[in-house]
Image (cartoon, rainbow, N blue to C red):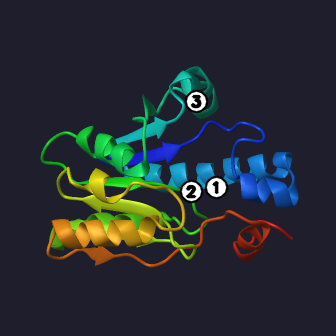
Amino acid sequence: AVAIFLDPPRLGAVKPRLAAEVGAHHALRLYRVLASRTLAAVRALDVPTVIWFSPVEAQPEMRHWLGPSWTLRPQASGALGARLAAASHGVEPGYPWLVILSESAGLEPRLLSAALDALIDYPAVLGPTQQGGCYLIGARRPLPGLAAGVTEDGPGVLAALRTALDRMTPEWRELPELRVVESAADAAAAGLLV
């Protein structure tokens, strides 16, 4: 099962750093492009998928944006660890799970498939970003102690997740590093700005 964390596409609310550099309208357009690519990559896997959104009152807006074919659930409140724990517990017992934390230009079906394949041999997988964050985390089972190890969002999240996984499971697999589009330089490197 796959969970995707997405925000509603609101002008001025998504990609704030990118918006400050290229304008809110352009940042919103790029967010929509990246989210569409992420959704297409997941859809190519043909696995059960839930989109977790925030804030809770955005459900009509998310449904209008994404259409009727996606399962939507509001994210839990609190820090990233609590939201991860809620999403992992939303998976039917016995199924491995992946949570996609951020849309990225390099998040393709083959990478997601490799993440799922890695869960055959490893109890957990982690996808780091160049900015010190994480674009994906997954495991064969819920990881109830993960919330305690990840108390903040932002650049320190990768180190916190690595530490939490080291504590919780003897072996886990790290996926290739991706660049998340948070700035104009990131967007240019991903070929999204000319």
Residue 62: numbered disc: 3
Picture quarter containing residue 173? bottom left
Numbered label attached to residue 148: none
Q: Quadrant of residue 22?
A: bottom right
| Spot occupied by residue 154 in the image (x, y as percentages of width and height) | 54, 61
Amino acid type assigned to the residue bearing label 3 in the image: Met
Q: Residue at x 58, y 20 (%)?
A: 60
The alpha-carbon separation of the residues under discs 3 and 2 comes to 16 Å
Marks 1 and 2, how far apart in space?
A: 6 Å
Residue 11, percent from left and from top: 77, 38
| Residue 70 placement, left or right of 115 | right
- The reply to whether residue 110 is in sight is no
The residue pinned by badge 2 equals 103
Q: Secondary structure at mark 2?
A: loop
Res. 159 visible in picture:
yes
Sequence order check: which comes first, mark 1 or mark 3? 1
Residue indicated by mark 1: 34
Q: Judge left or right: residue 148 versus residue 11.
A: left
Q: Residues within 10 Å of mark 2 (few under 14, many from 20)?
A: many
Counting residues from the N terminus, which is met first, the one under dot 1 or under dot 2? 1
Structural crowding at the residue carrying mark 1, measured as other residues with C-alpha within 10 Å and reported as few (<14), some (14–19) or many (≥20): many
The x, y position of residue 152, in whole percent, is 46, 55
Q: Contact, CB < 8 Å: mark 1 with mark 2?
A: yes
Q: Toward the viewer: 182 or 37?
A: 182
Q: Residues within 10 Å of mark 3 (few under 14, many from 20)?
A: many
- SS at circle 3: helix
| Spatial separation of the CA atoms under disc 1 and disc 3 | 16 Å
